[in-house]
Structure formats: C-alpha cells, structure tokens
Image: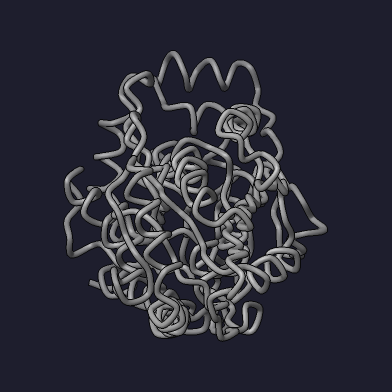
Amino acid sequence: MPAIASYCTTFLKPEMLHIYRQVTGLRNFETFIMTKERQHTDRFPFDAVELLARPRINFLARFHKKYIRRLEPVFYRGEYDQLSAVLTRRHADLLHVYFGHTGVHLLPFIRHWSGPTLVSFHGMDIMPRPNEPGYDARLRELLQTLPMVLARSESLASRLVELGCDPAKIRINRTGIPLDAFPFRERIAPPDGSWRLTQAARLIEKKGIDDSLRAFAAFHSAHPSSTFSLAGDGPLRPQLEALAEELKIAASVRFLGFQSQEQLRALYESSHIFLHPSRTTGGLDQEGVPNSMLEAMAAGLPVVATLHGGIPEAVEHGVSGLLTPERNAKALETSLLELAHDAQKYSAMSAAAARSVRHKFEQRTAIAALEGFYTELIESHRRKASR
C-alpha cells in the first residue's frame, strides 16, 4: 500500500478529533504521524507515531548554515535532515501537512523535498498574521508552490483563491462524521415548553457564544422552563459566566466544560435545538464547517446558526435550520421563537438536518474522497518524474 506521512505539530489537541478520525479512517493507504508533541494518548491511541525530538546539531555547522550560507531555520536547526530521514526510512509516497501555518513553517522543506506535498486548511490557519513580518508573503508562496491544496469548505476555498491559489489546485476535504456514533432520533416539540438548547464549542470569540446567551435570555422570557447547555471550555468562560449572571439566566444555563463523545451523544439525545452563531473575528478568523454542528445534525437537532463560513454548505435555511446574519442576537432570538411556535416545522427540520449530514458528510464517503485526492497527486507526481 502507498504510505502517507501526516505531519501535525501536536498530535492531538482535544478539539482535533476530526483529524484523528481522518487519519485512522484510511483504508487503502498506510499512514504514520510525524509530530513534535504527543498529547492525550488515551483519547487518541495510535501506534505509528514518529516523535520528532529537537535535533542535535553541531554549533559550527549551525553557524555555517545560518550565517555563511544564509539558509532558512528548517535547515540550520536540523529539521530538514530529520524529516528527510524519517520520510526515507518510512518510504513515504506523500506528505500531508495539517494546517496552513505549519505549511508556511515547512515551506523550505516542501520546496526541496523530492516527493509530493499537500496542505489542508481548516479555518483559523488562513488568517493573516500582520505581527509576523513576511508571514503573509510566505503563505502566498506556499499556495503557489504546492501541487494540491485541501480546504474544509467552499468558503475557505474562496479565501485561498483570494490569496492567489490556483483554483485548479484546490480540493474540498469535507469533515467526515461517523453516523453510527450519533444515531438519528425523531424529535417533537416539548408540549410543556421545556426546550433544551445546546451549543458545543470552544469558548472563544469566533463561536459567538455571547450572542447565544443574549438570544437565549429573550427566548427564556417566553419559555421560562427552557435551559441552555454549553459543552466546551476556553479562555472566555469567566466572561460568559458573568454575562449569564448579568442577563439573569445563570440558573438556566449549564457550563459543562469539555465533554467526551459519549457525553456529547447523550447531550444531543436529550436536546431540542443546536445553536452555533459563528462569526468572523477582527483577525479574520472564520469557521470551516463546525464538527459539533454536524454531529448534532446527524442526531436530528435542527440548527439555528449564522450565515458564516462553511455553515450554509451544511445547513439549508428554512429546511434543515435557520440562518441569520452574524453578530445579531435579535435575529437569533426570532429564529428560536419561530421554531418553538411551529411544531410541524420543527419536526421537519429535525429530519432534514439528519438527511443533510448523511448526504454530504458521512465519514466513509469523506475518507474515500480524501484517498482519491492522495491517489491523484501521487500518480500526477510519478508521471511528471518519469518525463
């Protein structure tokens, strides 16, 4: 079988479950991981991992490469030799680099390595970095150098084109959801008004959780038995807890912290509506297609979200959910009330949400597409090498 080297600087942070699913889901390729840091081995067990310790390099050799030959850090820090040795020993046919900023760091290696490389972009890694001199120019150079680029959504693909990437190089690498892990359950509106809303996300600006809380506060006034559960953790938790107190809804809002897949499945099973009002940050950070949203949809939760990033590629407004402009808590409130006031629409959207995920984001289909991209690039590289 052809061998894929998957490079991920940290393998893996808790929010990178989608990468674990992708790497472990390959069927027609062998794969191994190259990483600088191994985390959460109990949550992400995987045997074929090459832990890249900091290379030892002779001081004089480093000085010569850095100051005499003026080589880039990948060379004078010893990374190039280390990566080359691993790829040669493992007989790698292709290098898949996870995240654009990592691709920028490895650009000198990518330019010189004899094998084919692709980089996948997931959202945050497409942000400009004005505080890092030369970064944006190197990102554009990376896009021009690579023979193939993966994007998690059409919206991210459009951003890559704006940065100078040839559209012919881009392939859409959808998130794959294991549907058996999030079985569909038919939903009906709670007759007593005890709506259970939920959002699963890191507690960061991009997720729009302050808008969720404000919209829920208004919804709660109309439905006093309703609750809102927040699964996830992050730096904004203290501010969001304070906002819940300020809005006088703290008793009806649950901050659950990080949840396992089993806990999320149970949470979705007991919920009625999934909220996800993502927004573009001041630094131009945006979503691809949120994994938690797809999992909730697979379980049959209608979505109330925003016209942001790749969300409209999964949620059809008025069919599988309701989409509003970004940063508009009033519009979110209106959508929530609309769902709560129309039991027939609510049930229809529940079924449509699950159908949408099964049609576009089923894991085996997504893995087959990725393997097709690998095959395409390997064969293209071999044809060029034989000329």
Closest to the observer: 279 or 80?
279
| Quarter containing the C terminus | bottom left
**For the point 57% across and 22% down, which residue is it?**
61
Counting from the top left corner in percent of width and height, residue 20 is at 62, 63
**For the point 50% across and 42% down, which residue is it?**
209
Say above or below: 11 vs 351. Answer: above
Closest to the observer: 170 or 203?
203
Counting from the top left corner in percent of width and height, residue 267 is at 68, 65
Using the rendered image of the protein, determine whether residue 11 is visible from the camera's viewpoint. no
Q: How many marks?
A: 0
Counting from the top left corner in percent of width and height, residue 195 is at 58, 64
| Quarter containing the N terminus | bottom right
Q: Is residue 70 left or right of residue 271?
A: left
Using the rendered image of the protein, determine whether residue 310 is visible from the camera's viewpoint. yes
**For the point 77% across and 63% down, which residue is it?**
45
Say above or below: 52 vs 33. Answer: above
Say above or below: 317 vs 332. Answer: below
Which picture quadrant has residue 178? bottom right
Counting from the top left corner in percent of width and height, residue 121 is at 39, 52
